[in-house]
Amino acid sequence: MKKIFLILLACSVFSLGMGKKPAKEAVPAEKGNAAIQTEGSSKSAPQFTLKDLDGKDVSLKDFKDKKAVLLVFWATWCIYCVEEISDLIKLTEQYKGKELVIFGVNLEETTKKVAPFAKKNKINYSILFDEKGTVARAYEVQGLPANVLIDKKGNIIYSGSYSEELEKLIAATLKK
């Protein structure tokens, strides 16, 4: 009986939070959401170079002082990541030719798996591959999907779920 209880307890601890739908609205900074960065407390974005679907290197440093960058950490198996794709497609169209670039940073999956998935879902933003999860760890990603907005100066100004708050922040950032 004791063994069964320990097994159930271990399973409960392991699965804590798994499968929960991410919040649609970000918690305001004053409510204690440490993931949301404000202008006065922005943090420099960790630099990285990752391969895209075509095998070309893409470096974050190439966008500094040129474009704001939205990183979306995701995986094909993540239900909520798949749901978010339509919003990201619309966002890409909305800011086409403007000073925003969107990268879907795929976690630990292969080009062979992701390429047909991207085609099937008509993904119109660039996909990068974080094969070992090192970039996700550098950005302190806790779950998927995770959105990180980086301003033109290279500072993280938002980290959290896709929301109206993020959309407003993108618009405000691009007006500067």
Image: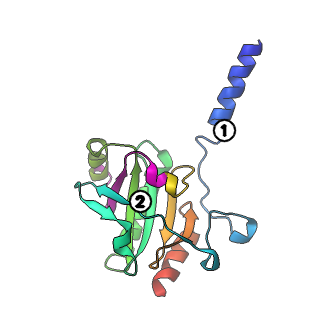
- Residue that numbered label 2 is attached to: 86
Q: Is residue 13 left or right of residue 109?
A: right
The crowding category of the residue bearing disc 1, from other C-alpha atoms within 10 Å (few below 14, some 14 to 19, many at least 20), is few
Question: Can you see residue 81?
Answer: yes
Q: Position of residue 29 (x, y in %)?
A: 69, 70
Which residue range is magenta in the image? 120-136
Q: Which residue is rendered at x = 68% and y = 27% of the image?
A: 10
Question: For this rendering, which residue is in front, 138 or 98?
Answer: 138
Which quadrant: the N terminus?
A: top right
The crowding category of the residue bearing disc 2, from other C-alpha atoms within 10 Å (few below 14, some 14 to 19, many at least 20), is some
- Residue that numbered label 1 is attached to: 16
Question: For this rendering, which residue is in front, 153 or 31?
Answer: 153
Q: Position of residue 42 (x, y in %)?
A: 59, 74
Residue 125 figure quarter: bottom left
**Mark 2 element type:** helix
Q: What's the distance in space between the residues labelled 2 and 1, CA to CA? A: 28 Å
**Between disc 2 and disc 1, whose residue precedes?**
1
Residue 122 figure quarter: bottom left
